[in-house]
């Protein structure tokens, strides 16, 4: 980046570049936090939180190299993403296993009928 270059509005390219990376990292952190919350609630047996339907993810364009000052933040975010993806994979395997177990149960021949009569 050339520190002397500016955007049309007079904002230095360097400041715009940092803001773009800040925004991109924040958006990814929000998504990871939502996935972590969902997994935690499901694991605790709670109903999942109400969430609007997810929109398609669009990769940030033309950000270039990440600023060195954001490297630790990006590494931590990557670690959280890997952990969430592992937890999601495990939850999917467990759900499939439970689904298979449910399909193996034989349905009752007749539904039980209870009659309540006054004596």
Image (cartoon, grey):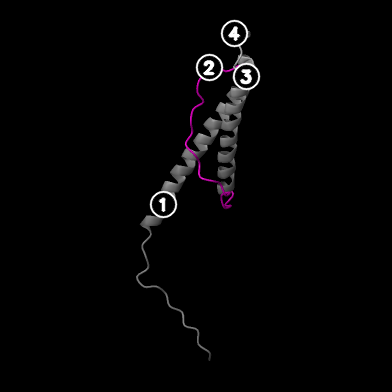
Residue 17 lies, in percent from the top left, at 59, 18
Q: CA distance from mark 1 to mark 3?
A: 57 Å
For the point 49% across and 39% down, the residue is 55
Q: CA distance from mark 3 to mark 4?
A: 17 Å
Q: Nearer the viewer, residue 115 or 38?
A: 38
Other-residue count near label 4 (Cα within 10 Å), few / some / many at <14 / 14–19 / ≥20 = few
For the point 57% across and 49% down, the residue is 50
**Between marks 3 and 2 in the image, the one whose residue lies nearer the viewer:** 3
Q: CA distance from mark 2 to mark 4?
A: 13 Å
Residues at badges 1 and 4 in contact (C-beta under 8 Å)?
A: no
The magenta region covers 44-69
Instruction: Give the mark nearest the N terminus, 3 or 4.
Output: 4
Q: Nearer the viewer, residue 12 or 87?
A: 12
Does dot 4 land on a helix, a strand or a loop? Answer: loop
Residue at mark 1: 99
Residue at mark 2: 64
């Amino acid at each position: 980046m050339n520190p002397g270059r500016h955007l049309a509005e007079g904002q230095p390219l360097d400041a715009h570049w940092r803001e773009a990376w800040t925004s991109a990292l924040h958006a990814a952190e929000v998504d990871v936090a939502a996935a972590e919350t969902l997994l935690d609630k499901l694991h605790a047996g709670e109903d999942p939180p109400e969430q609007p339907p997810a929109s398609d993810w669009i990769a940030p364009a033309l950000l270039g190299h990440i600023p060195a000052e954001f490297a630790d933040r990006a590494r931590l975010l990557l670690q959280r993403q890997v952990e969430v993806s592992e937890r999601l994979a495990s939850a999917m395997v467990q759900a499939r296993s439970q689904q298979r177990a449910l399909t193996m149960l034989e349905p009752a021949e007749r539904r039980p009928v209870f009659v309540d009569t006054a004596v």
